[in-house]
Amino acid sequence: MKIRWNKVFNFFLLMILLVILAGFQNTFWYQLFGTVPAPMLWLCMVVYVALYRKLYGALFTIYIMSLAIMGFTVMPVKMLLLTLLFVFLILYTIRSRVFWDGPAYYTLMCIVASVSYHIIYFLGSWMMERNSAPLEFWDRIIQLVLTPAFCLPLFTILSKIDKLTLDELTTETRGYDL
């Protein structure tokens, strides 16, 4: 089996960017803006992988991303993996029905992912954990507003990384015929 080093390089660049964004979100954001909740920048990366990678590659990458995110959160592993799996399934279902390439679609899918992430996380925590997550309505609304604001710069960075490191065979930029 031939190893495609461009895919490996792309994977490591995505992981480095994920760690940088999660670190910015968890430390530097609060130095600048105080108690204002940070946008979920790592979720935007999960959305990009879910939209522009093939099924098994996307699942593997999102699984490794969730393990990398674990260092930046107090969320249990089962909740993070379960939540990201359901968010991926929602995005994959939408992508298989309706897809167009570009930042507008990516931003729309980031909004869908943010809303579904909060709903799935809250319901999953309520059903599976002894001490469920608090609702924190205003914090979640602020995150839902701020997360799409960072989608355009992230889309530009991620698409440039893909142009530099991937070929046409490794990305999937269309829906599926069922």
Image (spheres, rainbow, N blue to C red):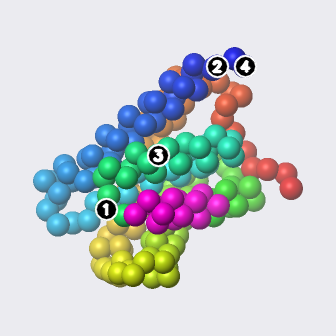
The disc, 2 or 1, on the residue closer to the chain's N-terminal end is 2
- What's under tag 2, amino acid-wise? Ile
Evaluate whether residue 87 shows in this view.
Answer: no
Residue annotated with mark 2: 3
- What's under tag 4, amino acid-wise? Met
Callout 3: SS: helix
Distance between mark 4 and mark 3 Cα atoms: 25 Å
Evaluate whether residue 18 shows in this view.
Answer: yes
Main secondary-structure element of the magenta-colored stretch = helix
Residue annotated with mark 3: 65
Distance between mark 2 and mark 4 Cα atoms: 6 Å
Q: Disc 2 vs disc 1: Cβ atoms closer than 8 Å?
A: no
Callout 1: SS: loop
Give the quarter of the figure containing the N terminus: top right
Residue annotated with mark 4: 1
Q: Residue at x 46, y 36 (%)?
A: 14
Q: Disc 3 vs disc 1: Cβ atoms closer than 8 Å?
A: no
Q: Which residues are magenta?
A: 76-89
Q: Residue at x 67, y 49 (%)?
A: 100
Q: Residue 144, how many percent across, how many down?
A: 40, 68
Q: Residue 146, how many percent across, how many down?
A: 34, 62
Distance between mark 2 and mark 1 Cα atoms: 36 Å
Q: Is residue 166 magenta?
A: no
The disc, 3 or 1, on the residue closer to the chain's N-terminal end is 3
Residue annotated with mark 1: 74
Q: Residue at x 58, y 26 (%)?
A: 7
Q: Is residue 84 magenta?
A: yes
